[in-house]
Image: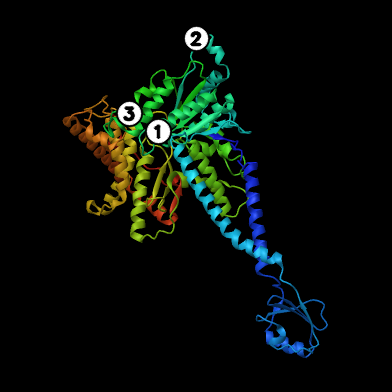
Amino acid sequence: MAANKPNKQPAKSGGPKQLIRMGLFWAIVIFLGLAIYAAVVPGNNLKEVPLSDVINRANKGQIAVLEIQGNDITVTPKGKDKPTEKTVKESGNIREQGLREDAPVEVRVVPVSATQDLLWNLAIMIVPVVVIVIFFMFMMRQAQGQNNQAMGFGKSKARLYGLDKEKVVFDDIAGNDNAKQDLQEVVDFLKNPKKYQELGAKIPKGVLLVGNPGTGKTMLARAVAGEAEVPFFSISGSEFVEMFVGVGASRVRDLFTKAKKNAPCIIFIDEIDAVGRKRGSGMGGGHDEREQTLNQILVEMDGFDANANVIVLAATNRADVLDPALLRPGRFDRRVNIMLPERKDREAILKVHFKNKPTDNTVNIDKLAAKTAGSSGADLANIANEAAIIAARRGRKKIANDDLTEAFEKVAIGPERKTKVMSEKEKELTAYHEAGHAIVGHVLPDSDPVHKVTIIPRGGTGGVTWFLPPEDKSYTNVYEFKDILARAMGGRVAEKLLYGDDGITTGAGSDLRKATEIARDMIIEQGMGQQLRDQVFHEDNGGLMFDKMTRDRPYSDETAKLIDKEVEVLIKEAARRAELVLKENRDFLDKLAEALLKEETLEETAVEAILKDAKLPKDAMLHAA
């Protein structure tokens, strides 16, 4: 999911009254500063000299004029038109301080300026007052701000959109045409409500957008507002909840009050599961803040007038944990599933994200779309951005195909850690481990083909064997699951063949965890066990630890033992099949490991060339699930 138009918000600026106040304040400050400067620092450009030196030079006839103002004296030397020096005398007549009566110098006595004294006195009186006034104004503003914050504690924090010059519409969004078609009906409700009201139809009050993270739920909600040309109030579910009980409910009331005043409009609550979880879990009692907020949302949604013309959109990726009261008719009437993009949608999304990025003729968007099965729109945007960053780091003007490949691998399996130091023995172990995965996955008939094998550490792993499906899949059968388990065990089995049972390492830890998760999912969620075939034991508790402690499991202890036994059987069967394959193809295991030690990374074609004659033992085939 991608949009090619940014949504800009108009910038806010201060009002004219605030500008006038600020201008007046700074004018007063500048005036006082100049007054103090003029009163305290007169004649600051004159050179200061000792009084004895001035009197001595005056008696010798080297000074033309002495201008006395109070105790300050300015000196004009012979041949000068303006004073160039200054000094300070003691109280009394300057004649009494050494200046001769017959000295050839003009003595001018200038009365002390009343303006200067006035400015000085004003500065002494006004400056402290101004400082005190400014201090109290600051304190009052702080108190007023805190008062406003306290008064607005229960106000909604929803952001209002819909006045933007550039709006997001459905045509700006690539992919997921089915979801857009479902939401188009909501747009028609908002644009033409009378058409439905004349037939007695009620406008739906709520639409729930359900999808994986990064699939574009928020963007689709904004596109609905953009298409309908109505205001759009956006808020996160977590913004309702505060530490004080009742604040969330107050914010809900305020939000819906604003929405009714701006009708027709849309309220969008992102991550509604933050406040919409099932009630009655026992956490927090009946006065839990989250439950109070949820109750208020339920009341507000059910209290709309028939012609209120306000629709609530909510987004979540965990619809299974929502309270049933939210999902009943009359509240969230519609449920729109936003799926991960298919191949053609991924291609369209990638073209949007590469629209403003220069690429050379080696870049193949269609090939990248084929390799990114299971990626969301956010993943694809991240790949495009990483490709641009990598190209810039390499000093290129255009993005090349190898930049795109590296970006895809970095996002999918993690960045390379070439700086990690590995001993020769660790490299050998890693090479055989990854070769074991590759050979088992290569020869098993229902496994995805090998895309790349590397012994360069990536992310948190020592090496990677990467399998990519040739096409998008909606379903996985039991044979494919068992081949996935077998190739996951291939690394541990290769270690055993190389070093014996006592030589196995922790390198297979993540493989074993993944295999166990898949095996348990097959038994508990998919009904693919032998003794527990067609039975599902799903634990619907929302993943809360408190729920797990207080609720009974949906199966008995005897069934739990059977589940553990079924998981054990699947893991042992996978290990046996992997061992049969690797023993049959031991020569190819050595060849592939040697090639990895030499090249460190092998692409799909290189692996195919080495393993083209590898065989599948008959005993390793699955004749019955």
Percent across and percent down for residue 159 are 52, 35
Q: Secondary structure at mark 3?
A: loop
- Residue tagged by mark 3? 278
Question: In the picture, residue 350 is in which quadrant?
Answer: top right
- Residue tagged by mark 2? 200
Could you tell whether 428 is left or right of 391 in the image?
left
Question: In the picture, residue 29 is in which quadrant?
Answer: bottom right
- Residue tagged by mark 1? 248
Percent across and percent down for residue 442 are 38, 41
Q: Secondary structure at mark 1?
A: helix
Q: Quadrant of the C terminus?
A: top left
Residue type at numbered disc 3:
Lys
Disc 2 and disc 3 in contact, CB within 8 angstroms: no
Residue type at numbered disc 1:
Gly
Residue at position x 49%, y 23% in the image: 311
Residue at position x 47%, y 25% in the image: 312
Percent across and percent down for residue 356 are 62, 41
Residue at position x 80%, y 76% in the image: 82
The Cα–Cα distance between marks 2 and 3, rounded to whole angstroms, is 33 Å
Q: Secondary structure at mark 2?
A: loop
Could you tell whether 71 is left or right of 312 in the image?
right
Q: Residue 319, relative to residue 582: is it above or below?
A: above
